[in-house]
Amino acid sequence: MPVSCSDHREAMLLLALKKRLAEGNLSPREQRDLEVEIRRLEERLKL
């Protein structure tokens, strides 16, 4: 299944955001912002 460059880039961004969230040491706002962005990317990538 071919993957476009933008899909690949978004998938890598999603992984980086999930890693950042898992590392912790975030303010409540940073955590909420990361969770929102992760959900947006998951919906975009249909995960």
Image (spheres, rainbow, N blue to C red):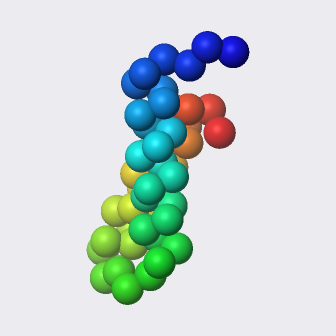
The image shows residue 47 at horizontal and vertical percentages of 65, 39
The image shows residue 38 at horizontal and vertical percentages of 47, 52
- Toward the bottom, the furthest residue is 25
The image shows residue 1 at horizontal and vertical percentages of 69, 15
Q: How many marks?
A: 0
- Toward the top, the furthest residue is 2
Q: Nearer the viewer, residue 28 or 22?
A: 22
The answer to whether 19 is drawn above or below residue 16 in the figure is: below
**Quadrant in the rendering for residue 28:** bottom left
Q: Tell me the residue at 48%/17% (across/down).
A: 4
Q: Tell me the residue at 56%/19% (across/down).
A: 3
Q: Is residue 41 visible?
A: no
The image shows residue 17 at horizontal and vertical percentages of 43, 58
Q: Is residue 36 visible?
A: yes
Q: Nearer the viewer, residue 25 or 8?
A: 8
Q: Tell me the residue at 55%/42% (across/down).
A: 42
The answer to whether 25 is drawn above or below residue 6 in the figure is: below
Q: Tell me the residue at 48%/27% (across/down).
A: 7
- Toward the right, the furthest residue is 1
**Residue 46 relative to residue 40: left or right:** right
The answer to whether 8 is drawn above or below residue 2 in the figure is: below
